Image: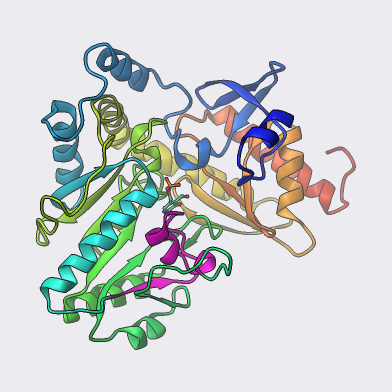
Amino acid sequence: MQREQQYVMQTYRRAEVEFVRGEGALLFDGQGRQYVDLLSGISVASLGHCPAPVIEAVSDQIGRLLHVSNLFYTGPMVDLAERISTRSIGGPVFFCNSGAEANECAIKVARKHASGRGIDDPEIIVFEGDFHGRTYGALSATPGLASSPDLGPMLPGFRSVPFDDAAALEAAFGENTAAVLMEPVQGEAGVFPASEETLSTARRLCDESGALLIFDEVQTGVGRTGSLWAYEQTAVRPDVLTTAKALGGGVAIGACVNSERLGQVLEPGDHGSTFAAGPVAASAALAVLDAVDDPGMLRRIRDLGRFLRESLLAIEGVTEVRGRGLMLGVGFEQGIDARTLNSVLLERGFVANAPRPDTLRLLPPFVLEDEQAAGAVAAIGEVVADLRGGRGEA
Ligand code: PLP
């Protein structure tokens, strides 16, 4: 910890645990202590830690070809593009290495598309509370961070409206609107699904004006909400979709997909990335999609999500459980500090996260076993009871 403070830029507030090994839904620290993971490395290790299909795919590929750049063709990259495209909105894919970069691509697509419509001063509408990443484009599109006085100037061309306010969205639309960029379910804000009304208003306004509807599915995508993509559970299809996090099962990869109707927008020279969809990362992602894009797996995500939702709601002190599938925000009555709850849970061997003082966020791996899920609910119930002063044993 001391060396970390000395040698690592201090951009994170880390919990005082060093993990050295992971297996399925379990993590182990340096002392051999076991933890049940309810966070999946923030929605990344969805198939659990060191999942066999990903290890096999990566091991098989890594000894043949590790990197060759995007100046040449590689098979896994093309296979992955075809798989993502045909299982989402049908158009061409740009690959990158993270969620922020996937959104950078979407911003470029939106601006270039707007330029083609004769808009010189394009504006992208975003929602308060949305999180799109830390690079300057994505940061400027993240209202809660874009106002940081020390990090400016931000990229111009973004306008924010209150979350889930369809009327405000409509009022913000103008001649220069290039796109609406939104999370179908806000993740970092504390798990807040956008309403069907907001989604359909955004779709209608984009259709009427020719602007693009961009869904940031970096956190919601790749099965997390119980369908391969969150938009599949709504009446709305986006024109552009971004994904990363769980796509590589722990290997860094991201992607930005256009719809079939939108087709190619970017041209040679408009965008690029040295590492993107290298053979190893692309092979990992293909293995992940093989496992997740499966009716049995998606049903398991929904069933486990339902179990967690119902049993958490039965805990006194829990006021609501928001979200879909295995993306859950657990809300508590006043007086229960979710951050304290989260720290006590960690001491008891459960890894979760508190994105706001009244919310515990659960993003468990899809391979969480019934017994582990029941144990997590029991532990949360005991700690909540203790925090409410009802019991003294937590
Ligand atoms: N978009 C959403 C919805 C996210 O939740 C995140 C990360 O939490 C990002 C974008 C940024 O992804 P990355 O950290 O891989 O750049």
Q: Taking the image as drawn, is residue 198 in sight?
A: yes
Whether residue 111 is situated above or below residue 273 in the rendered picture: below
Quarter occupied by residue 224: top left
Residue 356 percent coordinates (x, y): 64, 58
Q: Quadrant of the C terminus?
A: top right
Left of 173 or right of it: where is 74? left
Quadrant that contains the N terminus:
top right
Height in image: 6 above or below 188?
above
Residues in magenta? 123-146
Q: Is residue 380 shown left or right of residue 162?
A: right
Q: Residue 278, how many percent across, how many down?
A: 25, 30
Which residue occupies the foreground of this view, 272 or 278? Answer: 272
Question: Which residue lies at the image location 60% right of the left edge and 47% below the top edge?
Answer: 11
Q: Residue at x 26, y 29 (%)?
A: 290
Residue 354 located within the stretch drawn in magenta: no
Does residue 1 appear anywhere in the picture?
A: no
* In this view, 107 is above or below 66: below
